[in-house]
Amino acid sequence: MNTMEPYSAQLADVYDMVYTSRGKDYQAEAEALTALVHARRPAATSLLDVACGTGEHLRHLHAFDAEGVELADPMRAKATAKGLRVHAGDMRNFTLGRTFDVVACLFSSIGYMRSVSELRAAARSMADHLEPGGLLIVDPWFHPDDWEGGHLDHTVAIADGRTVLRLAHSTREGRTSRVTYHYLTGDTDGITTFVDKHEMTLFTREEYTEAITRAGCAGIEYVKGWEAGRDRVVAVKTAPADKRSWSEPGR
């Protein structure tokens, strides 16, 4: 059984199928995001989705001139195949040469930052792409008090002559959460298996707030997130970033 890098070609090939089978409603989530934006910045017309994956949120953000940034080549290829504008980039240091009314980092992708210093760098990179008064919207990963590990989960997805079985097991070491996914995929050509491992940091609300404030944003709100029990951070770009965001060591 092969162990792949996160967001490998094998994962990208089944990603949309698996999450659709799990009931993830990208259209409804995009509509909720649009409503949140219009309630706070009615004139917003441009949006950047950072770590946009296969582009399923982007595909439904019809109210905006929307673009994406994605680090993983296989995921980005899936998005561009849908006719979406997606740039190659790492949320910690990407530069697009333009600004947007809204910059969003959805589905807890920010949790891949390995330290507070990386969290600060990502917040700054995103805020640097905002117009003055623009909105920064971030879906945090779990907070330290919300993650115990030791959970087992399964998904069965069946579509278009293919069956995918995914088993997931979670663990925790300090402030690091780990999820190991075992995939079994089958179609008329045969059966394949692979293992997909993810490590994500359990940042506190205070650490998110500090990173976003250093990035030059204010008016920080924690609102209802994309599913029950999860929060979403909303902030307004008000000032240039604090240069210390780059220079001070993190944990």
Image (cartoon, rainbow, N blue to C red):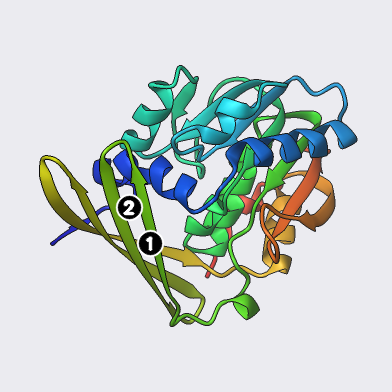
x then y, percent, for residue 88: 41, 29
* Within-10-Å neighbours for mark 2: few <14, some 14–19, many 20+: some
- Residue 76 higher or lower than 90, as above or below: above
Q: Quadrant of residue 72?
A: top left
Residue 240 makes an appearance in the image: no
Q: Is residue 133 left or right of residue 81?
A: right
Per the image, label 1 sits on a secondary structure element best described as: strand
Nearest to N terminus: mark 1 or mark 2: 2
Identify the amino acid type marked 1.
His
Cβ atoms at labels 1 and 2 below 8 Å apart: yes
Tag 2: amino acid: Pro
Q: Position of residue 62 (x, y in %)?
A: 67, 21
Residue 33, how many percent across, how many down?
73, 39
Residue placed under numbered mark 1 in the picture: 198
Q: Residue at x 80, y 55 (%)?
A: 223
Neighbor class of circle 1 (other Cα within 10 Å; few <14, some 14-19, many 20+) is: some
Q: CA distance from mark 1 to mark 2?
A: 6 Å
Image height of 251 relative to 185, above or below: below
